[in-house]
Image: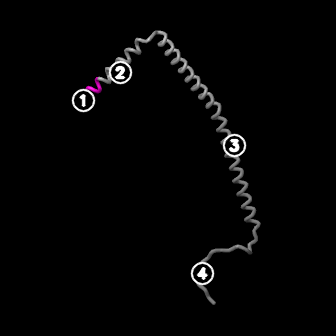
Amino acid sequence: MMYRSRFKAYTAAMQNKLKEANNSGVFARIIAWIVLGMLLVVGIAVFVFMLLLSWLLIPIMIWRGKRRMAGFQNKAAQQQAEQQNAHQNQPQQGRVFDAEVINKSD
């Protein structure tokens, strides 16, 4: 029961504040609408700017990614070719093979 009376008092106070706000001058309402409209226009302008910027930057970023990936592939192919050349140029004497001895005859 105590909560209901607090709630009623709170709602009555809020209603009184809203009535006072509604009784404010026409000039204050006009300024509030103008400010709200300007904020809305600025928000839309920022949104459109970011949208256009993303449309311009996405193809550039894709192109840079493809170019970077091609560089990585070229570097990997070059390293693989170097490893094959080094492997072919190694002498056969220094090679070590792992093996298991099955039968050892002296």
The residue to which callout 1 is attached is 2
From which residue to which does the magenta span run? 1-8
Q: Give the Cα distance between marks 1 and 2.
A: 19 Å
Residue that badge 2 annotates? 14
Q: Which residue is drawn at 56% across and 20% down?
A: 41
Name which quarter of the figure residue 47 lies in: top right
Q: Which of marks 2 and 4 is in front?
A: 2
Q: How far apart are marks 2 and 4 (CA)?
A: 95 Å
Residue 9 percent location from the top left of the image: 30, 23
Q: Is residue 100 above or below residue 72?
A: below
Task: Depth check: give the residue in front, 74 or 104.
Answer: 74
Position of residue 4 in the picture relative to residue 65 (left or right)? left
Residue 67: mark in rendering? 3
**Which residue lies under the disc numbered 4?**
101
Q: Residues within 10 Å of mark 3 (few under 14, many from 20)?
A: few
Circle number at residue 60: none
Amino acid type shown at disc 4:
Val
